[in-house]
Amino acid sequence: MFQQLGIIGCGLMGGSFALALKKAGLVRRVVGYSKSPSTTEAARRLGVVDVVADSALLATSGSDLVLLAVPVSATESTLRAIRHLVSPQTLVMDVGSTKQDVVLAAQKALGKHIESFVPAHPIAGKEKSGVANADADLYLGSQVVLTPLPSNRPELVQKAIDVWSALGCRVLRMEPRLHDAAFAAVSHLPHLLAYSYFNAVAAQTSGSDFMSLAGPGFRDFTRIAASEPGMWRDIFLSNRSELLQQLKHFRHQLDAMERALEEEDGSGLERVLRQASEGRSRWQEPSSRRRAIVKPKV
Ligand SMILES: NC(=O)c1ccc[n+]([C@@H]2O[C@H](COP(=O)([O-])OP(=O)(O)OC[C@H]3O[C@@H](n4cnc5c(N)ncnc54)[C@H](O)[C@@H]3O)[C@@H](O)[C@H]2O)c1
Ligand SMILES: O=C(O)C(=O)C[C@]1(C(=O)O)C=C[C@H](O)C=C1
């Protein structure tokens, strides 16, 4: 049981974490800070936070668990703002979608307090941001990647594993570099493609007429194109080199499809379509292997 959770960034991810911890009975009090006072006030009205803090530092004061749920580009300044109140017993985590830059930001900002910062990335979310979309069950059954640092206090790493496990998550440990390479392929590239594809259709003269006829295929493929642009700008820029690498792989496949179409190469086309269809049918969504909620150890 945590005495106080300090949420910095009371949006979708931070708000959902607060609600999940409350639902699991793992926290006595939640204090929240967000850049915009109207957001923090909405979080209080919705019962996501109990107390509104006027700064990130005040949200950290007295908290034994602090969660940064801000855009990845705000990690360094936020950690700098709270570092004086991070004690050796405080567990500080983030939920950022990239990890190499977050670790770098923490190294620059935290000094000796880095021992308390355990970088985390829950593989959960949705295209709707903001505290109004926070959901106590958002993390249930999801994977959470931790990229612990060599300087982390082992008991805080264990505490991080315990708290996510208690929320019904499967916790994995990974090197930041490997994390960023993997999520460039399975999260960042699909978002980039969804945004590009949507614009490619919408920019055509008849784009809106075409879209008025669209069915579930279009809906499913473009859902994530409605995601928050500022957040994804940050993610793309922060993981730029891995994303560029993934774009090369994608362009190679697209070129092969285009060639097969131009040459009316039906068997070549079917070969690549079959390869994808069989692979996708075999793929099992990790979060569909839902785990029972384990007894909280925290
Ligand atoms: N949305 C997703 O699906 C998803 C999934 C996994 C991880 N993430 C990561 O979670 C983080 C938060 O994303 P979200 O979807 O909750 O966004 P969000 O827009 O819903 O919430 C972010 C909140 O942070 C606040 N904020 C922005 N800058 C701030 C600052 N400097 N100091 C304090 N508060 C600040 C905003 O006002 C907002 O309340 C991002 O780093 C993102 O990469 C998002
Ligand atoms: O469900 C969605 O809308 C998401 O995009 C969630 C999603 C993803 O799977 O790519 C988005 C960003 C992350 O950092 C983790 C999860």
Image (cartoon, rainbow, N blue to C red):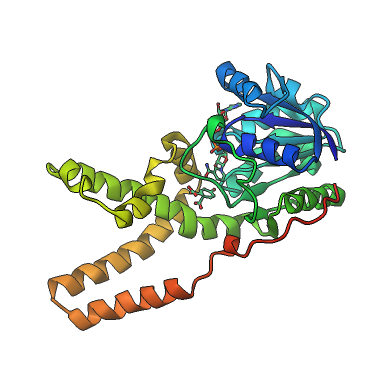
Q: Quadrant of ligand 1?
A: top right
Q: Which image quadrant is residue 90 in? A: top right
Q: Residue furthest bottom?
A: 267
- In what quadrant of the picture does the N terminus appear? top right
Front residue of 44 and 40: 44
The spot of residue 143 in percent (x, y) is 63, 57
- Asked if residue 61 is positioned above or below residue 253 in the image, the reply reads above
The spot of residue 245 in percent (x, y) is 42, 59
Which residue is located at x 34 percent, y 46 percent?
195
- Asked if residue 37 is positioned above or below residue 79 in the image, the reply reads above
Which residue is located at x 74 percent, y 34 percent?
66
Q: Which image quadrant is residue 263 in? A: bottom left
Front residue of 187 and 148: 187
- Report whether residue 112 is seen: no
The spot of residue 133 in percent (x, y) is 53, 35
- Report whether residue 222 is seen: yes
Q: Which image quadrant is residue 212 in? A: top left
